[in-house]
Amino acid sequence: GSGTSGSADGVGDAAEFSYPTEVAISADGSTLLVGSEGGLRQVCVAAPPPPPSFAPLVVPPSTFSADMGKMWGDDALPQGMVTFLVGDDEERIEHVSKNNLCARSPVFRTMFGIGMKERDAAEVTVSHTDPASFTALIDYLLSDKFDLGEEEGRAQRALDLRELAQMYQVPRLELLCAQALQESVGPASAVPLLEAAHTTGDGRLLA
């Protein structure tokens, strides 16, 4: 303790107590419990560790022009358009260029690669997401546009789109979503952000 008579919890010699009569130590060895005339006081043996720090989010420049340029002369790219049937109701997202998708996402490049059944398919079913999120993904891939819409519900839309960006290996879009999530932290978004940080192990969402 501090050597001064009083009654206060604290770290090391910052704690104060008067006429101590009993002492116990916590199971992890980090805290002394001191019984005195002023009641039960806690003396932290060491300061608690600082919260983890994460590198700030840095969104790299767009690669859209470079990605589009890679299509020139690449005869492994598929030709034609595809219609996606999205969600439980199989909402149609029509006439999407296969080769553009392949240039922007390695997952689509594999999906429409040589020997894959989707390469010549006119329709592909996507059941793991909702139409709004998948449309936002396609919009980004084809035009580099990042738009989460109106402020209300923005955090949840960013979470859903970030999950798709991870699934289809689009790292810049993932960072844009994470940046939007950081900027939208508030009472309404705190719980989904905590759940997402726990599920993904990405503490940057709460940085």
Image: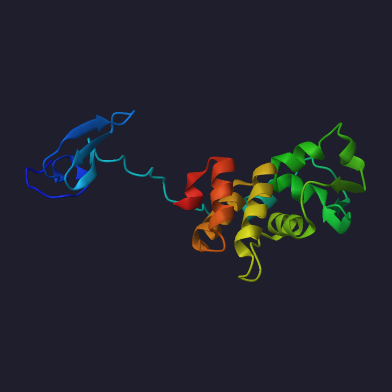
Q: Which of 15 and 91 is in front in this view?
A: 15
Residue found at x 80% / y 38%: 111
Asked which quadrant contains residue 42, the reply is top left
Picture mark count? 0
Asked which quadrant contains residue 142, the reply is bottom right
x%, y% of residue 95?
87, 57
Left/right placement of residue 61 relative to residue 31 reads right
Q: Can residue 18 be seen in this view?
A: yes
Q: Which of 62 and 10 is in front in this view?
A: 10
Q: Is residue 197 above or below residue 64?
A: above
Q: Is residue 57 visible?
A: no
Q: In this view, does 55 lie above or below 184?
A: above
Left/right placement of residue 173 relative to residue 113 reads left
x%, y% of residue 153?
64, 65
x%, y% of residue 75?
80, 39
Here the colouring is rainbow
Residue found at x 60% / y 70%: 151
Q: Residue furthest left?
A: 3
x%, y% of residue 147?
65, 65
Residue found at x 52% / y 43%: 202
Left/right placement of residue 28 relative to residue 116 reads left
Residue found at x 87% / y 47%: 125
- Quadrant of the image for the N terminus? top left
Q: Which of 41 and 96 is in front in this view?
A: 41
Asked which quadrant contains residue 41, the reply is top left
